[in-house]
Image (cartoon, rainbow, N blue to C red):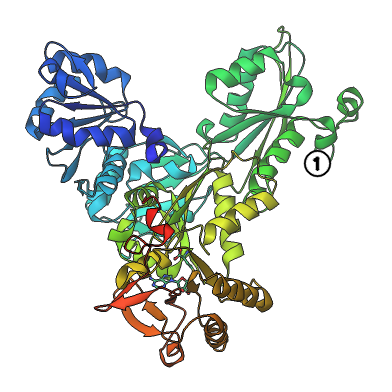
Amino acid sequence: MSQSLFEPFQPLVAIATTPQAVATLQPLCQFTGATLWVPETLASLSNAQVYSGSLKDHLQHLWPQHRGFIFGLATGAVVRLIAPLLQHKSQDPAVLVVDEQGQSVISLCSGHLGHADQLTRLIAAQIGATPIITGTSTRSQLPSLDLLGHPFGWQRGAGDWNQVSGEIARQQAVAVIQDAGSKLWQSHLPVEHPYVFADWPEEAPQIRITHCALPDSDVPTVAWHPRVLWVGIGCERGTSRQLIEQGIEQVFRENGLAIDAIASITTLDLKADEVGLLELCQDRDWPLQCFSSEMLRTVEVPTPSDIVAAEVGTPSVAEAAALYAAQIQSDVLAAGPATLIAPKCIIRNAGEPGAMTVAIALSPLEFTGRQGKLYLVGTGPGSLDQMTPAAQTAIVQADSVIGYSLYIDLVQSRLRPGQVIETYPITQERQRAQRAIALAHWGLTVAMISSGDAGIYGMAGLVLEELEHQGWNGEAPAVQIFPGVSALQASASRVGTPLMHDFCAISLSDRLTPWEVIEKRLQAAAAADFVTALYNPRSQLRVEHLTIAQAIMLEYRDANTPVAVVRSAYREDEATQLTTLGQLHTVTVDMLTTVLIGNGSTHTYQNWMITPRGYLSSSPSASVASS
Ligand code: SAH
C-alpha cells in the first residue's frame, strides 16, 4: 500500500530486457505503480507489456508520455538510448538505472527538476539498495538550489541559475536575501554551508527569496518567489479578460512586484460567475477565492466606499477580499497579520466598456498550492533493519519529519537534505501533534514518527484524536499510517515465544490513565491468564507501580512463572534478563524496558521462554488452526 508514496512521479515506466532484470523490476513495479515493458523474447516470462521492434524506437514513443523511466539495463546502454531524446533539464523525465541484482539504484538524469534523485532514494529505501546520487548537493548535504522552495510551493523566477548553482557547488559564499516566505528551509542546513544571511561581500552571487520583481544586478542572481500575494479584484459586470489581466500586470509593474508571487485572486461571491475573471484564472492557473459581503464587511480597509456598500453590501471588495484571504492563509500557522501593500487602484480604458479595481495584500505565510499529507510512521524498536521498507520510504518522502529527539536520532541516516526536521521534548506530545497537523494543512508532507508502532502508545492515536477535535473532513490532510514492530514483539523475539498464546499489553503509566483503571486491568489480565506485556513499567516518580503489578499477578500465578525483562531491544545498549514473577522486584527496570509476564503454562527451556500454543498437548486447543 506504499504505492501512494510514488504518486507524485506518475506515470512511471520500467524497462527490462533480461529475465533477471524482469525479476528485479517486477516487485518494484508493484510498489511504485510503474508499467513494465519487455521485449517479445520475454513475453512468456511475465504479465508485462510487450513491445515489438527495437527498444530505441519504442522509447521514442514512451518518452513524452512519462515522468520517470526505470531501466534494468547496463548504464552505458541506457545512456546511448536516451541521448537522442534529451532536451533540457526543465523538461526531461527522471531517468534511473537499477542493476540486475537490485543492489544499486542510480539517479542518471534529471536529478533535481525531474526529481530523479528523490525517486532513487525512495526506491533504494524500499528495496534495501544503495542509492547512487552524484550531484554536488548530495555531497554537501545541501538542498539543491533548483529545489529549495519546492516543499513550500515557491515559483522559480528569473536569474542565472547555472552560474549561482556552480558557485554553490564550488562552496563560494552566496548571499541569501529573503523578504518573503517561510524560513523553515534554513533550520536544517548542514553545519558547513555557503549561505550568508547578513553582511555579505558585495560581489557575492545572490539568492533572492522575494515577492518583488528581480532588480537589475551586476552579480549573478536568482529569484525564488514564495506565493504570498493575494490579489483582490472588483469589476463591473462584463469586464473583459484582457482588461483584468492588463490591470493586474499594471499594478504589479508599478509596485515592482513579481507575478510569480501570486497566491490567488480574490473577490466577492457575486463575481463567482464573471466570465472574464474565470477565463483569466483558468489560463494563468491562479486559484479564485470568493467571499460573501458579510465576510468582507468585517475587514478594516483604507479606502471604503459608501457607494460600493450600497450596491453590494460591503464598503470594500478588492482591498477587503485580498486582506481577508491573506489573513486566512497566515492563520494556518499563526504567522501574524496580513498587510495591504497596494491599496485599491481603479483601471479602465478610455472608450472601452468595463472597469475594475485591484488591491494587493501580503501574507506572512505563503500559499503552497500543495495538498498536505500526514504519515504516521512506526520506526520499530531501534535499529534501522527492524523498520519496514515502507516506513523508511515514507520518511525519505516527507518534507518534514517530526518526533522525539531520540527517535529522530535513530532514523538520522534516512533523513535527506532539505527536509524540515523538528524535535520536541517527550512531554509535549499534544503540541507536537498540533504542529504536524498545521504543517500538513499548510501543504507539507509530514512524517510524525513514533518508536515501535505509531498506533500502540504512540503518536498516531493522538494525531487522529486531534484531527477529530479540529473537525477534520477525513480527506485533507490525507493520513496514512505505517505500522512498525512494537516493543512487545521486539522484546519477545529476544527471549523466545512468550506471546504464542492470548496476550495483552498494559501500560503502567498513570499520566493519562487513572491508576485504579490500570489496577483493574491488571486484575482482569491476571485472572484470565493472559500473557501480559507491561509498557512504561517504571519512571523515577513511579517506582511502586511495578511492585503492585507483581503482587496482583502473584494472586493468580505461580511465583515461578517466567518473566522477561528486555531493555532497549535492538538498540546499542540492549539488555535482556529472564527471571520469575517472584523475583521480578530484584531486577532493574526502567522506562526503556518492556516486561513480559508468562501465563500459567509458560516455561523456559535452555534459556528460551516458551508459551505453548497447544500443538504438543492432547488438549482440544491442539487442533487450532495455525496462522
Ligand atoms: N509505540 C511504542 C511504545 C511507546 S511507549 C511501541 O509500539 O513499542 C514507551 C514504552 O515502550 C517504554 O516505556 C518501554 O516500555 C517500551 N519500549 C519502547 N521501545 C523499546 C525497546 N526498544 N525495548 C524495550 N522496550 C521498549
Left-right relation of 66 to 600: left
- In the rendered image, residue 611, in percent from the top left (x then y), is placed at 37, 69
Q: Quadrant of the N terminus?
A: top left
Depth check, front residue: 146 or 68: 68
Q: Is residue 431 above or below residue 350?
A: below
Q: Residue at x 16, y 42 (%)?
A: 102
User: Is disc 1 placed on a helix, strand or loop?
Assistant: loop
Q: Is residue 285 above or below residue 116?
A: above
Image region (quadrant) for ligand 1: bottom left
Depth check, front residue: 376 or 346: 376
Q: Which residue is mark 1?
A: 299
- In the rendered image, residue 8, in percent from the top left (x then y), is placed at 40, 34
Q: Residue at x 69, y 52 (%)?
A: 469
Count of numbered tags: 1
Depth check, front residue: 605 or 324: 605
Depth check, front residue: 320 or 97: 97
Q: Is residue 335 visible?
A: no
Q: Residue at x 57, y 42 (%)?
A: 477
Left-right relation of 587 to 321: left
Please, what is the three-letter code of the amino acid marked with disc 1? Val
